[in-house]
Image: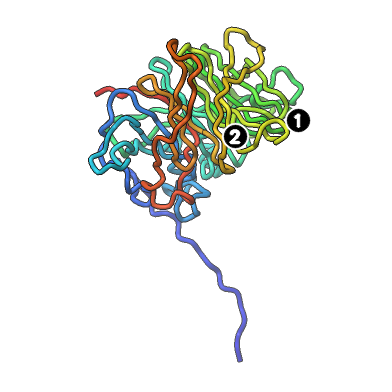
Amino acid sequence: MLLGGCVELTVEPPTGFAGDGLPAEIEVCPGCSSEQVTSGEAILLVNAKLSGPRSNFTANFAIDGEGRYIGAGLYLYDPRRECEDGGSGCRLARVGHLWLDDSMGALSVGDGSLERFGVRDLAWHPQRGLWGLSYDALNDEWGLVSLTVPDWRRTDNHVAVERYTFMPGPVSDAATDACYWRQMLSGLGFVGDTLVVGSAGKAGNGFDARGGVFSIPSSFLEAPSHCVFPNDRTLDPKYYACAPLCEVEALFEDRVGVAGDLTEDPQGRLLAAVRAEDPAIMPVDRNALFHVDMAAPGAAPASTGVVIDGLLAGRDIDGLARVDGVLYGIDPLGLVYRVIEPTPEQPDVWSVVVHDDLSPLFDDPIESLRLRGATRVVVEP
């Protein structure tokens, strides 16, 4: 006679990770350089795929089983470097991973939200530092993060994170942050000294399907702060920014918006990678580069005439960065484009060519790789 019954399955919590360095389990780029050899100008990339291999990279890697996690990975890429073996491995090195612990606040550690907390894009400024565009999946809220890399010469940094969530409120309330109800915030970059955010042309809970470009006030970047609001039942002291941060600079037409990233063009204008969500407007496998005139708030974005066609679903140009005067675009699976821009001598010359492919450096790029943002940085020798 067979006896039936229930078998209780248990999963042992992580044993904990303390001290310097990073656990071997989260190394997903065996082809990367083992030393941080880049100095001077380089491109900083964020791998937005979550860091836990046991979860098929759908969750962050638990440090201790108590709500603390290792988050997104940062990488330095030098597109100009020539590797002796003819490959790309010497061009790319890991910087480290975000460290999601008590510095994010005791309430965020306690509610489990850091398990799926991610960073969507990066922006760096020599005086204003390194910033990221963050998404809290548990609470379905976007925000900005200030990131601190302890030592740019190392490949195993614990990158410190300070988070400022966009102020919530009714969609029609002027006191609600203009970025709060956007379905997809997709780009972050500095234009001069101004930090700008880009949104896709998708209808969010605010029912506005026009993509947009938003500026962040310099006063916040100089002295970022948190506030507790009476209607926040958690009363979390390290979660919300104190005031609305996003100010509308430009809006695209309906169902058109920023597909990936924002950067400067050689004349200091804002340059955005744009796509449409409706094939009647523009082929949905196309990214187009648009200018936005920051000196004329409210002016309609204007196409530069440069397009990249034949992009597969999910492979928009999610990273834009300029190194040594050359503009590069990077897609989520590591394909690198070089954009040939017009010059005073050749004002009508625009072209886009494939420059590199970083995907072979990763052990399983389909599962573990999503390069969702890029920015130029300058690393001191």
Residue visible at 48% across and 12% down in the picture: 268
Expressed as whole percent of the image width and height from the top left, the position of residue 164 reads 54, 26
Q: Is residue 266 above or below residue 21?
A: above
Q: Secondary structure at mark 2?
A: loop
Residue visible at 61% across and 78% down in the picture: 5
- Amino acid at the residue labelled 2: Arg
Expressed as whole percent of the image width and height from the top left, the position of residue 254 reads 73, 27
Q: Which residue is mark 1?
A: 207
- Amino acid at the residue labelled 1: Phe
**Badge number at residue 286:** 2
Q: Secondary structure at mark 1?
A: loop
Q: Is residue 38 above or below residue 344?
A: below
User: In this rendering, does residue 148 appear at all?
Assistant: yes
Q: Nearer the viewer, mark 2 or mark 1?
A: 2
Q: Earlier in the sequence, mark 2 or mark 1?
A: 1
Expressed as whole percent of the image width and height from the top left, the position of residue 283 reads 65, 35
Judging depth in this view, the residue of 240 and 298 nearest the camera is 298
